[in-house]
Image (tube, grey):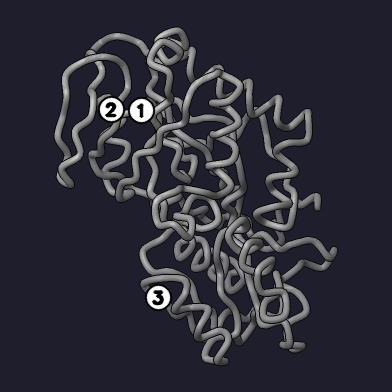
Amino acid sequence: MRRTIWTKLMAGAVAGTMMIGCLAGCGSSDSGSTDTTADGTTTEAADDGEALTLDAIKAKGKLVVATEAAYEPFEFLDEDGETIIGYNADILQQICDDLGVELEYVDLPFQGILAGLEAKKYDMVGATLGITAERAEKYTITEPIQSGTNVFIKRADDDSIKTADDMAGKIVGTQTSSYNETDTIAYNDAVVAEGGEGYAELKTYDSYPEAYTELRNGQVDLVAQNYASACALVLENPDLYELVVNENGEVAMISESETWLGWAVRKSDTELSDYINSEIEKFKENGFLAEEQEKWFGETVELPSTDYIPAE
């Protein structure tokens, strides 16, 4: 499904940034000393000042990737409680297969994952990261692997909402202290600034499951979340939820501009970042990326190869 950004009434709105932080983690990168993490895991740390090459990864026989396996459908634990599966996992596995190495995951809390990358605790961060100018200054951010732009989700049986214009006077829910909250507020402010009627109320929740429970129960009329996660929700619950469209029948983007999702590599490790980007481009061309999007989100989205890092 080809999507365009819904820009009506959005002049002057402030696009949110992905609020994904990070905690020092564990994992191996190159050869070097060993570290023991808070959970008792002992891992290798890379030698300081030395770029990680593809030859070094091949010699090691594995690519060590940090993530938090708690963000379905991007990365989450399978029924065995140990195996990490998901959209990101499938793509990273194919990248490793093409390189001829094993994919080794390190499962960590989000908070501090990027700090662990700087400390060379692992080779890259393969968690779902919002692409921001600030991150791009510190790390090489890969080409986007999905869209994180804000959208509205409604109850499938709610005929009072046909398009995003119908959010006027409605109760909207989203996650607190997130870029989704920032974008949802900015969108409403832009509508009101243009003389329109905004939300009746914006309710925030600690987690999205809480918001969707209240949506099902009629306590809120709409929930604002990123496009990819919303697609996955609708794919699994087509009788319960629908994405809200614009006047052209396309999914309504409630941000000033697109937010893209990608992975992070150290600035010094140019061979690795270049290889990952070449693989992403190959997957676009051979249809693998589209197949994975259909599998996990039920929709395909065109991803940019350039100009995906926002301005300051």
Mark 3 is surrounded, within 10 Å at the Cα level, by few (under 14), some (14 to 19) or many (20 or more) other residues, namely some
> If you read the primary sequence from the N terminus, does the residue marked by circle 2 or circle 1 appear first?
2
The amino acid sitting under disc 3 is Tyr
Q: Name which quarter of the figure residue 162 lies in.
A: bottom right
Query: Label 2's element?
Result: helix
| Residue 269 drawn at (x, y percent) | 41, 16
Q: CA distance from mark 2 to mark 1?
A: 9 Å
Q: Which residue is depicted at the point 47% across and 27% down?
A: 102
Left or right: residue 64 compared with residue 148: left
**Which residue carries the number 2 mark?**
118
The amino acid sitting under disc 2 is Glu
Residue 138 or residue 84, whichever sits in front: 84
The amino acid sitting under disc 1 is Lys
Q: Name which quarter of the figure residue 133 lies in.
A: top left
Left or right: residue 58 compared with residue 157: left
- Marker disc for residue 205: 3
CB contact under 8 Å: marks 2 and 1: yes
- Marker disc for residue 32: none
**Which residue carries the number 1 mark?**
138
| Quadrant of the snapshot with the C terminus | top left
